Image (spheres, helix red, strand yellow):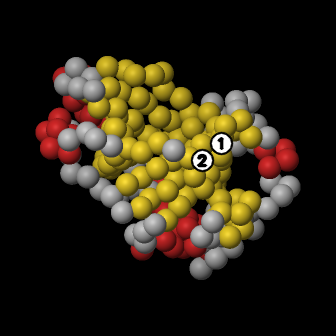
């Protein structure tokens, strides 16, 4: 179980190149090659995890199956990992079960403590870039694509025009140090919340 600080802020697509120039000015280095991330999020039939996220309820969980390299979840040739993100007071954790077999995984119920049985709800994919600035890890997610599992909807796929920058640091990192080096105002940005909000608005 990994414990860390996660902070986010949103930028408009028109600010993308300006932000890259700022990173270059600050002498940030490329940490990893950019890649496509695709996740299938699971939730209860009454969207309990989504509602907990919207209301900021603690503790709460988020469950997803993640893979890399393709915007199409089913056609991904890389391994699939089951990830459970756990938010409690002042702490965030992530539990990872590596290399699951998705051909058999969805044939049996998945029970999550505190929630019950969960089911696929939405696929979210995006392009991620990785940077390191004064020992702080930064990622930029762009081209965020929401693909809903309810294919009866007239519009089951939406592109998010916003970009999100995520700051990920060890739990013992000084918060003043983070703010001094990356002075942008922090915001809430949950891809799952945004995607499901759009899905529900179209379903009504």
Q: Which mark is residue 97?
A: 1
In the rendered image, the quadrant that contains the C terminus is bottom right
Q: Which residue is mark 2?
A: 83
Residue depicted at 43% across the width and 72% down the height: 57
> Residue 114: percent from the left, percent from the top?
60, 70
**Secondary-structure class at tag 1:** strand
Residue toward you, 175 or 146: 175
Residue toward you, 43 or 95: 95
Q: Between marks 2 and 1, how big is the CA–CA gap? A: 6 Å
Does any portion of residue 155 appear in the rendered image? yes
> Residue 179: percent from the left, percent from the top?
17, 43
Q: Is residue 38 left or right of residue 174?
A: right
Q: Of the residues under marks 2 and 1, which one precedes in the sequence?
A: 2
Residue depicted at 25% across the width and 33% down the height: 18
In the image, residue 140 sits, relative to residue 187, either above or below, namely above
**Secondary-structure class at tag 2:** strand
Q: Is residue 138 left or right of residue 109?
A: left
In the image, residue 10 sits, relative to residue 49, either above or below, namely above
Residue toward you, 35 or 160: 35
**Badge 2: residue crowd in 10 Å (few <14, some 14–19, many ≥20):** some
Does any portion of residue 163 appear in the rendered image? no
> Residue 187: percent from the left, percent from the top?
30, 56
For the residues labelled 2 and 1, say whether their Cβ atoms are less than 8 Å apart: yes
In the image, residue 86 sits, relative to residue 30, either above or below, namely below
User: Which label lies toward us, 2 or 1?
Assistant: 1
């Amino acid at each position: 179980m990994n414990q860390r600080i996660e902070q986010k802020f949103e930028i408009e697509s028109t600010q993308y190149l300006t932000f890259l120039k700022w990173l270059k000015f600050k002498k940030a280095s490329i940490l990893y090659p950019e890649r496509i991330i695709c996740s299938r999020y699971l939730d209860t039939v009454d969207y309990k995890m989504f509602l907990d996220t919207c209301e900021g309820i603690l503790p709460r969980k988020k469950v997803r199956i993640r893979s890399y390299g393709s915007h199409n979840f089913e056609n991904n040739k890389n391994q699939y990992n089951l990830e459970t993100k756990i938010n409690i007071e002042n702490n965030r954790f992530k539990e990872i079960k590596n290399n699951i077999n998705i051909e058999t995984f969805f044939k049996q119920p998945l029970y999550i403590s505190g929630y019950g049985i969960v089911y696929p709800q939405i696929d979210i994919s995006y392009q991620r870039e990785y940077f390191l600035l004064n020992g702080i890890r930064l990622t930029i997610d762009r081209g965020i694509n929401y693909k809903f599992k309810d294919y009866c909807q007239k519009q089951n796929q939406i592109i998010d025009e916003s970009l999100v920058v995520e700051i990920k640091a060890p739990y013992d990192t000084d918060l003043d140090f983070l703010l001094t080096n990356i002075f942008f105002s922090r915001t809430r940005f949950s891809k799952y919340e945004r995607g499901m909000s759009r899905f529900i608005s179209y379903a009504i």
